[in-house]
Image (cartoon, rainbow, N blue to C red):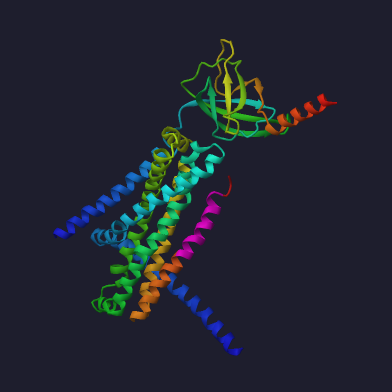
Amino acid sequence: MMNFIQTLGRNTRGSFTKLGRATFFLMQTATGVIEILPRPRLLLKQLYSVGVLSFLIISISGLFVGMVLGLQGFYILSDFGAEETLGVMVAASLVRELGPVVSALLFAGRAGSALTAEIGLMKATEQLSGMEMMAVDPIKRIISPRFLAGIISMPLLAALFSAIGIIGGQIVGSGLLGVDDGAYWSQMQAKIDFQDDIINGVIKSLVFGFVTSWIALFEGYDAIPTSEGVSRATTRTVVNSAFSILGLDFILTALMFGDD
Amino acid sequence: MQHNSTQDTLVGFFVATGIAVLFFLSLQVSNLSSFTEQKGYTITARFENSGGLRVKSPVSAAGVKIGQVSDISFDPKTYESVVKMRINAQYDSIPDDTTASIFTAGLLGEQYVSLEPGGSSEHLKQNSNIEITQSAIILEKAIGQFLFKSAEEKK
């Protein structure tokens, strides 16, 4: 019994300590972001590995998610004779929810895990302490550019996901199932609001990009520098990112779309 | 350096695509293109019941959209619904004895205000009032009346 209470106390204290370290880490990273602005080449390289390399998986997933939405939506809406509103359904669910959330989950799996593994391995092979020996701050040189690249890429990837999904829905809806093409687009334009839907979706994906990059970079930086430690940190990145994304999505949705 | 320059191109392509896609979403998917703070004037109409009318519902005349509802409020003195409508400036010659009615697009579609021009030579201006209005048809009420009637006939 005593043992149990001891473990509980140690774990609670441990998780608070970790959260504290993560917050401190975030502040250091954020100050580092200001200093990399005059050196865009560092950022460019990370935009390539975080953004461009996620481009393909996001586009293909977006296409299929949109096509599935088109198919499922059509079957349900045709029961009510409301196939014409398929465009609204596909666009609203993509722009508001699926675009930001699914692309953030994919981003955590594709780019977040790679970031954690890369930084964890840098730590394990003592590249980070080597930099410190040379009086180069590893947070500014290594972490901040990756962090900024994550925040920039995420909204672009989410927008790409939504747009390709909407086109996928149109391919299935009006190409295969015979929904009127004009109605698909015009109903969508009438019902999707720029402020409420598009801007809120972009804000969501910015938040998700921030959180996912933070978790991925911190887990890598905080990993136990062994091969097992790095593998565990990578797992934690994906799991924690998924939890945070879905939890935050609920909170953001309640805040944004609550009053109408 | 060769490698670096392809990387630059790809990053440029990525960012350009991202921004283009955001433009596509704003202009093609959302209502931004039709949402313009156009010049116009506001008129008011009082309805006994404005039903499911909402802010941004269309205002149309002869089936053409000429403006949108900008505000709906309840008047606690007359117990009426006060609907403010913003009419685009180009439609400035609507007679002041125009009738406003609330209709439903389709059986279950959204509600809109329909203006039916009268014959007066005076035109509606900023802050004009529409005197003759016809309330929204509330489906439940209509069904209730119908049932009541058919029950009476059976007696």
Q: Does the stretch in magenta take in B68?
A: no
Q: Which residue sits at x=36%, y=42%?
A: B23
Residue A193, given in percent of the width and then of the height, sits at: 48, 41
Q: Does the stretch in magenta take in A251?
A: yes
Quarter placement of the N terminus of chain B: bottom left
The single residue placed furthest to the right in the displayed view is: B155
Residue B137, given in percent of the width and then of the height, sits at: 67, 28
**Closest to the observer: B150 or B124?**
B150
Q: Which residue sits at x=38%, y=54%?
A: A61
Residue A191 in view (yes/no) = no
Quarter placement of the C terminus of chain B: top right
Q: Quadrant of residue A175?
A: top left
Asked whether, in this view, residue A73 is left or right of residue B119, the answer is left
The single residue placed furthest to the left in the displayed view is: B2
**Closest to the observer: B79 or A55?**
A55
Residue A192, given in percent of the width and then of the height, sits at: 47, 40
Instruction: Please say if A112 is above or below A66.
Output: below
Residue B29, given in percent of the width and then of the height, sits at: 42, 40
Q: Quadrant of residue A106?
A: bottom left
**Closest to the observer: B102 or B127?**
B102
Stretch of the chain drawn in magenta: A242-257
